[in-house]
Image (cartoon, rainbow, N blue to C red):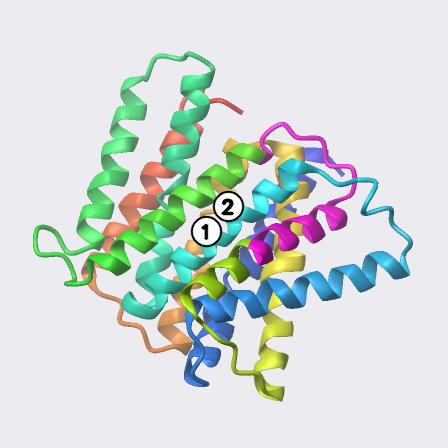
Amino acid sequence: MNSYLVGLSLVVISALCFSLQPLFASALYDLGWVPLSVLVLRFGCSVVLMAGFLGLTRRPFLALFDVRALLFGLCMAGSALGYYTAGQRLGFSLAVVLLFSFPVGVTCFLALRARQMPSPLRWIALGSAVLGTYWVIGGPSGPGDWVGISAGLGAACCYGLAMIISDGRVVRDPWIDVFWVSVGASLVLMAACWAMGVTLQPSNTALLLGMGLAVSATILATGLLITGIARIGASDASTISLSEALFSALFAVVWLGDSASSGLIGGGFLIVFGAYLLTRSPGAAR
C-alpha cells in the first residue's frame, strides 16, 4: 500500500483512540479523581505495560533512548493536563474544540522556519480559526471560566509543540518511543502531584479504567501518531488529526450529556475549517 495512505490511516485511527479519553476520564472523575491524578494513573499504567511488552519482545529500549521522544512526552503531559482540566471545568465537547486550534500554531511555525511569506489564503484561515475560538468561548462575556479556557488553549500550545518536535524525525521503533513518551509524561506529572500534594485513590475499578485509558489513549494512540507523522509529516498529520475533535465532541454530547450549543457547533466549524485551510494552503510546509 502507498506509504502516504498508510500514514493517513494510522493518524485517523490514532485520533479515534485519543477521542476515547473523555469517557475514561469522566468515569474516574465520578470516583473522586482529579485531572492530575487521572493522568498519573494513565501514564503510569502505560509505563508498566510498555516495559513488560518491550521486555517480552526483547526490544533494546535502553539502547534506543531518544531525547526527542522524552520531550514529546513532556509536551503530551502538558497538553493532557490542560485538556483534562478544561474538560472537567467546561465539558469535553468545548475543551476538545479549544485543543484543536493547535494546527494554527504548528503551520505558522513551519512556515516561519521555511521563511515563507503568508499568503492571503493563510490570513483568511487564521482569521477563521481565531474567530471560531472567540465564538466558542462565548464572545466578550465568555463562559465565565477563564481558568478552563486558558487550560484548553494551553493544551493546544503543548500539543502543537509535540507535533513540531516529532516533525522530520526518523522513527526506529514506535513502541520504544511510546515507552519513553510515557516515562517523560509520568516524571513531570508525578513531580506536579508531589508539589501540589495530590494523592491517588486506588481501587480495582480505577485501575481497570486507568489500564483502558493507557492502552487506548496512550499506547495505541501515541504509537500510531508517531508512526503516522514519520510517514506524512507534522503539517498533514495536524490536518488529519482534526478528526479527533469531531469524534470527541460527538462522544461527549452523546454519552456524557454535554450540550451542543450554537457557539460550540459554529465556532468549532470555523476552527476546524481554518486549521484545514491553513495546513492545505499552497506552499504550506510539509
* Image position, residue 49 (x, y; %): 74, 65
* Tag 1 near tag 2, CB within 8 Å: yes
Horizontal placement of 127 versus 10: left or right? left
Q: Residue at x 55, y 66 (%)?
A: 40
Quadrant that contains the C terminus:
top right
* Image position, residue 237 (x, y; %): 54, 39
Amino acid marked by disc 1 = Gly
Q: Secondary structure at mark 1?
A: helix
Q: Which residues are magenta?
A: 166-187
| Magenta stretch secondary structure, dominant | helix
Which of 201 and 21 lies nearest the eye of the viewer? 201
Where is residue 93, by image quadrant? bottom left
Amino acid marked by disc 2 = Cys
Residue 78: give its label: 1
Q: Residue at x 33, y 54 (%)?
A: 152
Within 10 Å of disc 1 (Cα), the crowding (few <14, some 14-19, many 20+) is many
* Image position, residue 148 (x, y; %): 27, 60
Q: Is residue 245 above or below residue 42?
A: above
Q: Is residue 42 above or below residue 204?
A: above
Pointer 2 residue = 75
